[in-house]
Amino acid sequence: MFEFFSSYLKEKAGLNEDELTQVRIVTVSKKLRKRQYLLQEGDVCHYNCFVVKGCLRNYRTSEDGSEHILRFAVENWWVSDPESYNNGTPSKNNIDALEESDLLMIEKVDFNNLLDTIPHFKDFIYNLKAKSFDVSQDRIMSNISNTAEEKYSNFIKTYSDIFSRVPLHMIASYLGLSRETLSRIRKAIS
């Protein structure tokens, strides 16, 4: 499993063999069954996780029991709860597997050590966080300014690899739409 991650880090972060060895030493593999939690609300997030295989979702549950999906994570994506991870506070989110998933996890203290000792890794993570911030800002703008049809079309174009793997009610949740609205949009497009 680490070979996949190693190739990713060589390509994306430009790490050499010595740096990859440093990463390998602190990386723990984890397999999740479908519907198994990586993180539950109330637990503290201690890891940054890289998805080798599978699909996960990060979501909150409101008091009425409805789910609000914040993000999905598929192969070559990272997943954690940044607020809990950064502050050491109980998570407000859940992260679970939508498919059988293989993850590589790095504990916070080890991750920070890698950032301190591997400049290429630090630069890579900085750029990754900047892109993630940009995507979040675009999503906020889309949610406040785009029509339901535009949100759905943009999701299909941007996340075609996720679209075919995730149930429609979860896509509706991610887009902030009701299932009925999403069904109406899909029917109109067909």
Image (cartoon, helix red, strand yellow):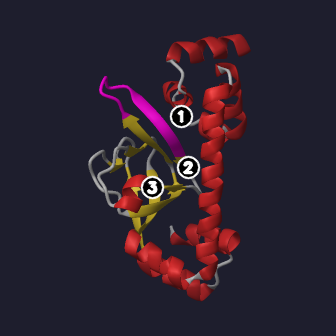
Distance (Cα) linking label 3 and label 1: 23 Å
Tell me residue 90's x, y (percent). Answer: 29, 52
Q: Is residue 23 magenta?
A: no
Tell me residue 95's x, y (percent). Answer: 40, 46
**On screen, 38 above or below 161?**
below
Q: Name the front one of labels 3 and 1.
A: 3
Q: Give residue 118's quadrant in the image.
A: bottom right
Taking the spot 70% from the left edge, 11% from the top edge, the residue there is: 188
Crowding at dot 2, Cα within 10 Å, few <14 / some 14-19 / many 20+, comes out as: many
Residue kind at label 3, given as amino acid type: Pro
Q: Label 1 belongs to which residue?
A: 166
Q: Secondary structure at mark 2?
A: strand
Q: Give the magenta-colored segment's residue range.
A: 61-72
Residue kind at label 1, given as amino acid type: Val
Q: Is residue 35 left or right of residue 168?
A: left
First in residue order: circle 3 vs circle 1: 3
Of the numbered discs in the image, which one, if any, rests on residue 74? 2
**On screen, 187 above or below 155?**
above
Tell me residue 28's x, y (percent). Answer: 40, 70
Nearest the eye: 29 or 184:
184
Taking the spot 45% from the left edge, 52% from the top edge, the residue there is: 101
Taking the spot 63% from the left edge, 69% from the top edge, the residue there is: 124
Can the viewer see residue 190 in this picture? no
Q: Give residue 168's quadrant in the image.
A: top right
Q: Label 3 belongs to which residue?
A: 82
Crowding at dot 1, Cα within 10 Å, few <14 / some 14-19 / many 20+, comes out as: some
